[in-house]
Amino acid sequence: MSTVTDPIADFLARIRNGTRAQKPEMLIPYSKIKAEIARILKDEGYITDYSIDTSAAHPRIKITNKLVNRSSAIAGLRRVSRPGLRRYVGAHEIPRVLGGMGLAILSTSRGILSGREARKQKVGGELLAYVW
C-alpha cells in the first residue's frame, strides 16, 4: 500500500486531472486543510461548489467543477511550498499571480487564506499554491 507524502500536492493533482478531463465532479479524500483550500477556491470563483461526503467509511470532498464556455475556470495549479523545500513569505512579500488575475493560497497563523485576504489582514505564512 502506498502512502501520499504530500497530500496538498495530491489534492491539486486530482483537481488538475479532473479539470483537464472536463469532469463535472471530483471526489477527493478529506482533510481539514483540503476542505479549507476548497472553500477558498469556491469563494474566489474557481469551483462551483464543494461538499463533504461522510456516508462512506472514509470521508471525501466532492468538488463541482466550474465550466465556462465548455472549459474549466481553473487554467492551472502549482504547488509552491513542498515537504522538501518550504517557502515562507511575509505580509508585504505575498506575490500577485498573473498580475492579480490568479490566486495565491497561504497557510497563516489565522488559518488557510487567499493572498488577497492575507494582504488585507497583514499576515504572512507558508505559500502553499498558485491557482490561475
Image (cartoon, rainbow, N blue to C red):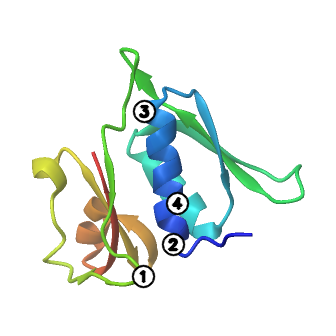
Q: Relative to the observer, which residue lies in front, 12 or 127?
A: 12
Count of numbered circles on the image: 4
Q: Residue at x 73, y 53 (%)?
A: 60
Residue type at mark 2: give it. Answer: Asp
Disc 2 to disc 4, C-alpha distance? 6 Å
Q: Which mark is residue 83?
A: 1
Q: Is residue 119 above or below residue 53?
A: below
Task: Answer left or right for 76 relative to 45.
Answer: left
Task: Answer left or right for 89 relative to 9.
Answer: left
Residue type at mark 3: give it. Answer: Arg
- Dot 4 or dot 3: first in sequence order is 4
- Image quarter (top left, top right, bottom left or bottom right) of the C terminus: top left
Q: Which percent across, then down, holds residue 109?
A: 42, 85
- Dot 1 or dot 3: first in sequence order is 3
Q: Is residue 125 above or below residue 95?
A: below
- Dot 3 or dot 2: first in sequence order is 2
Disc 1 to disc 3, C-alpha distance? 26 Å
Q: Is residue 76 above or below residue 70?
A: below
